[in-house]
Image (cartoon, grey):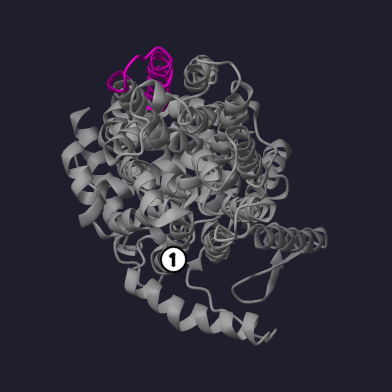
Amino acid sequence: MAEKVTTDHKHELQHHEERDAKHVDLNTNLQARIQNPLAGTDVDTLLRDVTEFADRHGLSEDVLLLKKGALVARDEENYENLTGEYACTEEEIAALRGEVEHKWRQPKALYLTIATCSIGAAVQGWDQTGSNGANLSFPMVMGIGSTSIHDTLLVGLVNAGPYIGSAFLGCWLSDPLNHYFGRRGTIFFAAVFCFLPVLGSAFCQTWEEMLVCRLLLGIGMGSKGSTVPIYAAENSPASIRGALVMSWQLWTAFGIMLGNAANLALVNVGKLTWRLQLGSAILPAIPLMIMIYFCPESPRWYIKKKRYGDAYKSLKTLRNNQLQAARDLYKIYIQVELEAELFKNNYITRFTQLFTIPRVRRATLASFTVMIAQQMCGINIIAFYSSSIFKDSGFSDYQALWASFGFGVINFVFAFPAIFTIDTFGRRALLLFTFPNMAWTLLAAGLCALIPQGTAHLALVALFVYIFAIFYSPGEGPVPFAYSAEVFPLSHREVGMGWAVATCLFWAAVLTMFLPLMLTAMGTTGVFCFYAGTNVLALIMIFFFVPETKQRTLEELDYIFAVPLSTFSKYQTGKAVPYFIKRWIFFQRNATLEPLYHLDSADDDKARIARLHANDAARKEQREAASRGITDDPASGSSTNEDEKAATADGSAVSQSEKKENGL
């Protein structure tokens, strides 16, 4: 037995060495090639490896389906050519074709998972806006309502409490919480901390008590914000991952809208108004705590813990067909093995490797850029202080709450287009389009604030703030959390997402604390113009530091971020900018853009569908030729009798005796 294990181990090491020799370097991908790790693997070797994998991890009963899944993963465009015992059934073919032709047909378990994540996002949004309405009354009740610098900073500190708690504790707890309790356990933990402190804040008597409750709320917000997008990303298929993960922002916007609605509904309650406005955010936390235990655990988390049987069960509930689950299980396993050889770490080194390993460092920079851009764009000056800003612009308290509610509605409604654009136009394209438009709308709002107070002043300020929200909602709104949840390798995903969310919420805390002082020193016009400038700066950072990730699996993104930053930047300035000028300034319709990445498979829906139909046509020709008793030899162009040759899993032709020997 020991001799067999040693032999198997030697074979595995030899296979890893052979695979690594031909594999793309995940730290320096100079050719910008995106590779299927199974492509080109010898069929016999692949089937032997799958058998060993199944034997080692208690999946021997499913070895035939795992082999078929591995063959499909090896060549995902020619699965209909598989023959013999590995031939796909009509049901399996329909499921695989459905991934391209009907990508929104997904199991109920997947949509339950996304619905639960959406409730988690709504909790986040409602928590943010409870203080928005309460700001109009609680400072006076707690004796910090004067216009002095001392009181202004204290109000800012109380409002910033959740973001301070998130940035310094909640986000960093997500890594150990996920390690020990999984994605679902972490989300339940976060939901508890989004329930109890919020309830406590409604009963606070002093600003110190309020600050403690809001700091504790930050633990829940940080660990939830760092985990929910990862959980959604890891459970979603690549073709619609962006749309499903961006539900975080969509339903955060919904939570903001509900929070503003609650603020408005409770405005005339009397002395209890601010308490009810703060405490109302417990409502979505209750179903979150209940529903999370009806959702499947992330299969990638199971694989990370080497619980492959559980991962397979989870995938079977998240995919339409067991063959898809078997394919995804083995393909994820192979890529995780590649990552494990490159990224050997523990909890402490994982953080330092965010800045030292080239592939991870590029993901860290990209996630940092999109997250800090969310603070640079100016959205949170409106989300946190819209009622105060509208009041300073001449609105009454009641009018200010209505104006804030209007902002919340627009922020939610205009997030919907991103469901259809984030996986077609892409994350990067949405950002590059929306940031210039956010810059000019804030500039216009600031200049309109100079108009003497009156109907025109109020209407124009509100109008340009709303237009700003229209551009924000489908771009910088959904992209940061969806993008940051997908860019890190599995080994660094929790700590990487924790870093990204901590970056976002730390600067949110800084803005929340000091925005009242900025408004006092610079005025409404000065603040709006300042953020118009930071939008331009964020646009430049995105242009140079943020690669596109649409339509690629989480494992394929290793190759995207293996491309050196110098290669990426040189392409943008030397190829992308000249193309943009020719195509959209001089309107040269014949202008073409040479792609940066060289893909082993199609990179968008149209290309996938076109290749699917091309393969259909090729198979039809082969069947017609077979019906005449001849088939073309792809190597020599000669024709041979169909009885002498048969198509194997890798598309080559072998004799019937060889086919039988190989089990094909």
Q: Position of residue 444 (x, y in %)?
A: 58, 63
Question: Helix, strand or loop at disc 1?
Answer: helix
x, y percentage for residue 396? 60, 37
In which quadrant will I find the N terminus? top left
Q: At x 68% / y 84%, what residue is drawn?
A: 587
Q: Is residue 648 above or below residue 240?
A: below
Task: List the single residue furthest toward the top.
Answer: 203
Res. 552 visible in picture: yes
Q: Is residue 108 above or below residue 67?
A: above
Is residue 195 shown in magenta?
A: yes
Q: Position of residue 107 (x, y in %)?
A: 65, 30
Q: Name the amino acid type tagged 1.
A: Gly
Q: Is residue 652 visible?
A: no
Residues 8 and 459: in front is 459
Tell me where residue 582 appears, x and y as whole percent: 60, 86
Range drawn in magenta: 182-209
Q: Based on the displayed image, in which of its 4 quarters is residue 579 positioned?
A: bottom right
Is residue 461 highlighted in magenta?
no
Residue displayed at 26% across by 29% down: 176
- For disc 1, the marked residue is 533
